[in-house]
Amino acid sequence: MLLANRIQYYRRIARAYLLPGQSQLTFWHETPELNPHLRSDALGEYYMTFATKADYAGHYDAKGIPMLDYHGAIGRQYNPIAVAQWGLGNYNLLRRTGHPSRREKVIRCADWLLTTLDQNSSGVWVWSHHFDWEYRDMLRAPWNSGLAQGQAISLLLRAHLETRNANYLGAARDAFKAFERAVDDGGVAFTDASGDWWIEEYIVHPPTHILNGFIWALWGVYDMFLATGENKYRQLYERGVRTLEHNLEAYDTGFWSLYEQSGTRLRMLASPFYHRLHIVQLRVMHRLTGSPVFARVADRWERYQASAFNRTRAILCKGVFKILYY
């Protein structure tokens, strides 16, 4: 059974990465871009553009909600992270153009998030993925994610700003409680031995602290503060910022960034896409916080990226990691 699962996994990966046509990567691998219109003092356009994602050229259901094609046994699925990013990209374009079709898509997205928010086995309101997923250990459906919580909250708050529909704000408040609950208690938060507070993209033991997922989810915490002005949200956001500042150097290999803190002998490097995403996310963090730590590391990681030797080395290391640990 294990061998059959591995063969199925590699077939699906080969179809997504090596063959032409649509896959889930068609959506995810948009060129990361900082939104020049972002604001740090008020809820406005989302912090990245998501412009290509707003006009996703892949599959949609009968109601116009995007679906990703994972191929193999997984097939086409809703992914709440993708739906939220699609909505956020359309919100940015709504703010710039005022076009009714963009507003309709934002509301469509927000309504879908309302209807799919559900309580997990611990009574925590979450957006679940309803397909099994290979991440070290198999994540069995339904599984939830701190990244989904953060980005869905960011979309709902902007839909509330646009429509004043109180249901959107209420759902965001309900979903936020996952950040206040530890992963062992059905939430998505983890406090390490040093007292640093993390949001976990994937709920596994021990936690892996995926960098891009933590940062994206943290923006959802910040958006709750901007939308409500409530101090408890600001305090939790600032705690997350301190965690990033304390631990960012641990993601630096001296030639490339790490995707996560894997805890394995061979560390998991970021792919070229995720390395670029890290740089953009750190630029956003510098804009939001003014902390020089984020600008300094972003500058360094851009220098890494400019080296053909570093890029090749990173791709080879990433490939070996996948073979050994996935």
Image (cartoon, rainbow, N blue to C red):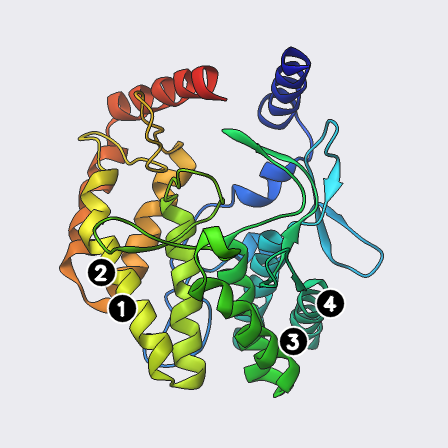
Question: Mark 2 sits on what residue?
Answer: 242
Amino acid type, residue under disc 3 in the picture = His
- From mark 4 to mark 1, how far is it between C-alphas? 31 Å
Circle 2 packing at 10 Å, graded few (<14), some (14-19), many (20+), is some
Residue 146 shown left or right of residue 246 in the figure: right
State whether residue 104 is above or below residue 291. below
Quadrant location, the N terminus: top right
Amino acid type, residue under disc 2 in the picture = Arg
Question: Mark 4 sits on what residue?
Answer: 115
Q: What label sits on residue 6 in the rendered view?
A: none
Q: Do the residues labelled 2 and 1 touch (CB within 8 Å)?
A: yes
What secondary structure is marked by label 3?
loop
Question: Mark 3 sits on what residue?
Answer: 99
Circle 1 packing at 10 Å, graded few (<14), some (14-19), many (20+), is some
Q: Are marks 3 and 4 in contact (CB under 8 Å)?
A: no
Residue at x-position 53% and y-position 55%: 186
- From mark 2 to mark 1, how far is it between C-alphas? 6 Å
Q: Tell me which label, 3 or 4, sits earlier in the chain.
A: 3
Q: Tell me which label, 2 or 3, sits earlier in the chain.
A: 3
Q: Where is residue 31 in the image (x, y as percent from the top left)?
A: 46, 45
State whether residue 230 is above or below residue 272. below
Residue 228 shown left or right of residue 131 in the figure: left
What secondary structure is marked by label 1?
helix
Q: For this rendering, which residue is in front, 160 or 312?
A: 160
- From mark 3 to mark 4, how far is it between C-alphas? 25 Å
Q: Where is residue 42 in the image (x, y as percent from the top left)?
A: 38, 81
